[in-house]
Image (spheres, rainbow, N blue to C red):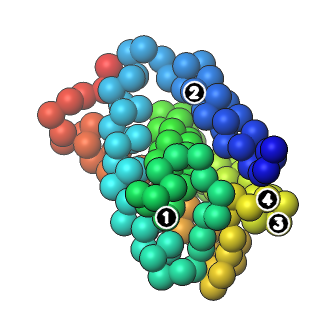
Amino acid sequence: MRYKLEKSIEVGAWIATILLLIKFVPKKRMREAQVAFMFKHVITWIFGLLVVEKNLISYPQRLFFKKAIKSSFTFEYFVYPALCALFNLYYPERKNAIKKFLYYFFHTGIITAFEAFAVRYTKLINYHKWRWYWSFITIWITYYISHLYHKWYFKFGTFTKE
């Protein structure tokens, strides 16, 4: 079977992400998670397509929508937004700046490390004119933008946190 590792990683990512969401998104905070998840779609739609269309990154092996879109549906539109939802739900709002920095660093670092693994050992992603540190920076920035939106939405939006 061709690309068995890639298919296993992608299916495993779906299963692990679904289990993380079931385990760590409390029912009373479901709406909050959905807002973060959907907002991340806006960001990844713009930036994800931009880097693929500019041939900075490619995704040679994908399970879904191979002919419809050049980016990875699994990672750009499910795993990454789901992790961002969890990031926002558990953000240490009342902690000091160092703990907040470490929280960002941990979440961004984990995603970047998995991406670096995928670049080196699989055909899930290829860097062309891209480096791991660009991923780290862009993930950090998009998490920051997402967190700002999350704070704004639940402070001034039509819904309130329960």
Q: Kindly report the distance in space between the C-alpha atoms of the residues bearing marks 2 and 3.
A: 26 Å
Q: Kindly report the distance in space between the C-alpha atoms of the residues bearing marks 4 and 1.
A: 17 Å
Instruction: Look at label 3 and name its amino acid.
Output: Arg
Q: Nearer the viewer, mark 4 or mark 2?
A: 4
Q: Which mark is residue 122?
A: 4
Residue under circle 2? Answer: 18
Q: Which mark is residue 120?
A: 3
Q: Kindly report the distance in space between the C-alpha atoms of the residues bearing marks 4 and 2.
A: 23 Å
Instruction: Look at label 1 and name its amino acid.
Output: Lys
User: Which residue is located at x 27 percent, y 47 percent?
Assistant: 152
Instruction: Look at label 4 and name its amino acid.
Output: Thr
Choose top left, top right, bottom left or bottom right for residue 18.
top right
Q: Secondary structure at mark 1?
A: loop
Q: Nearer the viewer, mark 3 or mark 1?
A: 1
Q: Nearer the viewer, mark 2 or mark 1?
A: 1
Residue under circle 1? Answer: 70
Image marks 4 and 3: residues in contact by CB distance under 8 Å: yes
Image marks 4 and 1: residues in contact by CB distance under 8 Å: no
